[in-house]
Amino acid sequence: MSISFRKPRKMSDHAFPRAACAIAGAATFGIGECPGYSALEMTARAGLLALQDAGLGLADVDGLFTCLPQDLLGGLAVAEYLGVPARFVDNNRTGGSSFLNHLMTACFMISAGYMKTALICYGSNQKSAAGRLVSALRGSVYEAPHGARMPVAGYALAASRHMHLYGTTREQLGAVALAARDWARLNPEAFRREEMVLDDYMSSRMISTPLSVADCCLVTDGAAAIVVTALDRARDLAQRPVAVLGAGAETTHKEIASMPDLCTTGARLSGQRAYAAAGYGPGDMDMVQLYDAFTINTVLFLEDLGFCPKGEGGRFVADGAIAPGGALAVNTNGGGLSCVHPGMYGLFTLVEAARQIRGQAGARQLGKADLAICHGNGGVLSSQTSVILGSPDTI
């Protein structure tokens, strides 16, 4: 008896359902310090605020996407707490890229007709509860014997390699930190708003050479949430819809010891896939909202997402190029370096882009804010996900 197999269908990077869905609501809660709230309570509060922003209620939610800092079944916990009898709960966790992955899944499922309204939410009380970074990352059997302090040591390794290959300097990494702080100073929600100059950066305490305290993300509390639904439905809701034009992802490794190239991340492919689906390129973007857990992230991702050639990231960010008034608006809320970093930052990139596109960013509002690329990073430069959002005019 012979067995025949159907020839697999060739997958296309254009398979993402372009502009089928939109962000209809967005909210944050408890940024900075939020004593007296558990991570679950913060997550729920952000979710309720996002639904209110969209003009919807819990009864409208039939898809729930979340993960809690230290609850392996956090999706079930949030569903129970909110009283949402969801048709689908996704608790998938890939680190800081999780929520952009959640958005991709939600868009596919909504466009397929399985659900109508997805709530994507996250919260952490790591600062008020523990006062330090809460991370499940540990050195692998290859790394732990050497005493590497993860995850910072992994990012320091990438930064050292970039410096060695391309001549990137600490002053250029400092330009990333200073730009983030300058944006944060325009954002009343940001946790760190005091002025920082290059001398402050250069004299900051070294953590893992070449990365100092000023190169590392904040340790804060904070919660965020977005509501996603079909674009046609979102047009009739309370806020101007923010269309999800394209998305792409790529995973290259888990441990930094297995990263194929310390200076090239999966963002190169995730970005290409997102651009192909959206029909736009790097030069069309009005802003970049990316996961800046460390200053080297910004340099690597700007290169890999096509904003400058490989090796030119340090020179690209120098002299205020990504600060307010610079050539490219990057992390307009202050990012994970100066606004908020409650263990995982990725969802905040989507909230900030939505606020900019809706014209609701206050003193930091960009003059032109129709297209944004948001980028999430998980693990130690391991999981990369890119999402392109646009105003109704970009569809």
Image: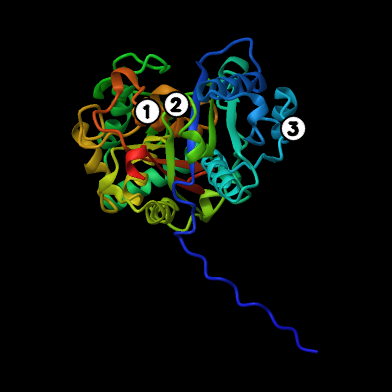
Looking at the rendering, which quadrant does residue 349 occupy?
top left
**Mark 3: few, some, or many residues within 10 Å (few <14, many ≥20)?**
some
In whole angstroms, how far apart are the C-alphas of marks 2 and 1? 8 Å
Amino acid type assigned to the residue bearing label 2 in the image: Gln
Residue drawn 33% across the image and 13% down it = 194
**Which mark lies nearer to you, 2 or 1?**
2
Residue closest to the eye, 251 or 159: 251
Q: How many marks?
A: 3
Neighbours of disc 1 within 10 Å: few (<14), some (14-19), many (20+): some
Sequence order check, earlier mark of 2 and 3: 3
Q: Can you give x and y, in whole percent of width and height, for residue 279 in the image?
A: 35, 53
Q: What residue type is labelled 1?
A: Arg
Would you name the residue on which mark 2 appears?
239
Q: Which residue carries the number 3 mark? A: 85
Location of residue 30 in the rendering, given as x and y in whole percent from the top left corner: 53, 16
Find the distance from the CA under tag 2 to the CA under tag 3.
25 Å
Between the residue at mark 1 and the residue at mark 3, the CA separation in whole angstroms equals 30 Å
Q: What residue type is labelled 3?
A: Pro
Residue drawn where x is 21% and y is 31% of the image: 320
Viewer can see residue 45 = yes
Q: Is residue 92 left or right of residue 293?
A: right
The answer to whether any part of residue 212 appears in the image is: no
Is 8 situated left or right of 382 in this image? Answer: right
Reading the image, the residue beneath label 1 is: 358
Dot 1: what SS? loop
Marks 2,1: beta carbons within 8 A: yes
Sequence-wise first label, 2 or 1: 2
10 Å neighbourhood of mark 2: few (<14), some, or many (≥20)? some
Horizontal side of residue 284 vs 130, given as left or right: left
